[in-house]
Image (cartoon, coloured by chain):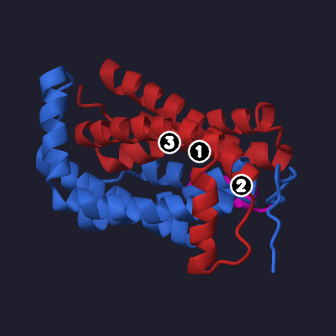
Chain colours: A blue, B red
């Protein structure tokens, strides 16, 4: 479920970047934001990104129902490594060695969090399964 | 440059606040009995009836639009890792608001993530 969450989130982010790059820089004013909103809701790439982000949301909600937020949140950061690779391969962005090192540190941190107990609190209102 | 970091701060506050509200709502909803489509639909049905869900959604929607604007201003390899600062804010929220047991290993992991994010952010040259 966490893997599905990471894949959906990163695919969605990548598609969002592609869609927003096509739209161009958003002007931070009333008319600029309204114009950007019109362009985003008519862009198919943005809608595909939203589809993946809805998939992420369902996985995220399910995982949060039984695991700690402080456990799930960093676990989702495993996607940074995947995302950096995707950004280099598909968006042709240049990534420096320092930035690669940062991504490695993020991943090590996420792995450390992954070693801890997933749930440390009681569920507020456990579901009663009826026959 | 200032507008990028102001918007990033706004994104961090709204996304973390929204996710903490969402977590509280999901814990109150309870986990699905099985990971089957029917059970997941029932779970989603119960989740949307929870008040905390509707506190979290507007905050997350606001943070989503802030993310869209950030993505149009800066490269994705800057925006997404920089948004990981929400790990630190979120962990503080998890400890003091959600009362989760954040032990040394978890904090160490979060600090490493934070240093990694700082390295990534320092290496980026903002466009404005």
For label 2, the SS is helix
- Tag 3's secondary structure? helix
* Magenta stretch prevailing secondary structure: helix
Residue A93 placement, left or right of B39: left
In magenta stretch: residue A107: yes
Q: Name above or below for residue B50 compared with residue A91.
A: above
Query: Compared with residue A100, is residue B120 higher up or lower down, i.e. above or below?
Result: above
Q: Quadrant of residue B30?
A: bottom right
Label whose residue precedes the other's in the sequence (2 or 1):
2
- x and y, in percent, of residue B56 in the image: 55, 39
Above or below, A92 relative to A122: below
Whole-percent x, y for residue A42 in the image? 14, 53
Pointer 2 with pointer 1, Cβ within 8 A: yes
Residue tagged 2? B29
Determine if the magenta segment contains residue A112.
Answer: yes
Q: Position of residue A52 (x, y in %)?
A: 38, 65
Q: Nearer the viewer, residue A22 or B45?
A: B45
Q: Which residues are magenta?
A: A104-115
| Res. A83 visible in picture | no
Mark 3 lies on residue = B57
Residues beneath discs 2 and 1 located on the same chain: yes
Q: Residues within 10 Å of mark 3 (few under 14, many from 20)?
A: some
Q: Is residue B99 visible?
A: yes
Looking at the image, do the residues carrying marks 1 and 3 touch, with CB atoms under 8 Å apart? yes
Q: Which residue is mark 1?
A: B53
- Image coordinates for residue A68, horizontal then vertical, percent: 75, 52
Q: Say which quarter of the image contains residue A76.
A: bottom right
Q: CA distance from mark 1 to mark 3?
A: 6 Å
Cα distance, mark 2 to mark 1?
A: 10 Å
Q: Residue at x 73, y 64 (%)?
A: B31
């Amino acid at each position: 479920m966490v893997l599905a969450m990471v894949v959906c989130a990163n695919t969605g982010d990548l598609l969002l970047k592609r869609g927003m790059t096509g739209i161009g820089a958003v002007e931070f004013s009333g008319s600029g934001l309204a114009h950007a909103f019109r362009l985003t809701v008519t862009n198919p790439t943005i809608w595909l990104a939203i589809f993946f982000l809805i998939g992420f949301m369902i996985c995220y909600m399910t995982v949060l129902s039984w695991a700690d937020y402080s456990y799930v949140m960093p676990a989702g950061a495993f996607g940074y490594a995947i995302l950096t690779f995707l950004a280099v391969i598909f968006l042709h962005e240049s990534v420096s060695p320092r930035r690669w090192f940062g991504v490695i540190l993020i991943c090590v941190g996420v792995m450390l969090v992954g070693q801890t107990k997933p749930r440390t609190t009681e569920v507020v209102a456990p579901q009663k399964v009826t026959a | 440059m200032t507008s990028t970091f102001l918007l990033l701060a706004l994104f961090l506050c709204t996304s973390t606040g929204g996710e903490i509200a969402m977590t509280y709502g999901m814990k109150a909803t309870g986990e699905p009995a099985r990971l089957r489509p029917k059970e997941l639909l029932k779970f989603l049905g119960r989740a949307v009836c929870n008040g905390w869900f509707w506190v979290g959604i507007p905050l997350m929607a606001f943070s989503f639009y802030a993310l869209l604007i950030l993505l149009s201003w800066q490269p994705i390899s800057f925006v997404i890792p920089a948004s990981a600062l929400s790990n630190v804010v979120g962990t503080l929220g998890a400890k003091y608001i959600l009362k989760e047991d954040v032990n040394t290993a978890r904090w160490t992991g979060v600090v490493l993530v934070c240093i990694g994010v700082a390295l990534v952010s320092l290496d980026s040259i903002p466009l404005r």
